Amino acid sequence: MRTALVDRPLDPTALLAEVAAVSSGASTLFVGTVRRSNQGRAVTGIDYSAYAPMAEAEMQRIAEEAVARFGTPHVVVEHRLGTLTLGEASIAIAVSHERRAAAMDAQRYIIEEFKARVPIWKREHYVDGDRAWVDNQGGAVAV
């Protein structure tokens, strides 16, 4: 099990290889990417920032919970910080497990808990030059 905040492009293939095990009959990979629109506004990129010690501790807790709930130690999560453009990966979650249902459930658990609990902040950049902070449900927030 490993979690990390990184400032380099994510390598989902490497994460998938990292969780590979001969005991696993299923491997799953979730990759979250910067999309071109949000809430009807054309997006050109997103700044991701965090207070790293707090975010890393919560990422670790979520991974530990997934390991305990779904019974696999083969979990890797990386989230990228910095400015990302359209199509770039912001988060990658790789899980392998003896059974496919447990692998998929663990991955779903991690991304849902991550969105609800990990303090990583997003500021979207729009085509019109405007920028706005958004919450984890994708809505713009006033500051």
Image (tube, helix red, strand yellow):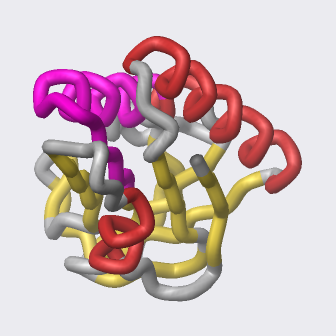
Look at the image and tell me whether residue 125 can be seen.
no
What are the residue bounds of the magenta stretch?
93-113
Residue 111, quarter of the rendered image: top left
* Spot occupied by residue 97 in the image (x, y as percentages of width and height): 28, 37
Quadrant of the image for the C terminus? top right
Q: How many marks?
A: 0
In the image, taking residue 77 as reference, residue 26 lies left or right, namely left
- Tell which of 15 and 92 is nearer to you: 15
- Tell which of 58 and 105 is nearer to you: 105
Predominant SS along the magenta part: helix
Residue at horizontal 20%, vertical 50%? 27
Q: Is residue 19 above or below residue 112?
A: below
Residue at horizontal 31%, vertical 35%? 107
* Spot occupied by residue 134 in the image (x, y as percentages of width and height): 46, 44
Residue at horizontal 46%, vertical 45%? 75
Look at the image and tell me whether residue 76 can be seen.
yes
Magenta stretch contains residue 37: no
Residue at horizontal 38%, vertical 19%? 70
- The residue most toward the top is 69
* Spot occupied by residue 37 in the image (x, y as percentages of width and height): 15, 60
* Spot occupied by residue 141 in the image (x, y as percentages of width and height): 50, 37
Residue 81, quarter of the rendered image: bottom right
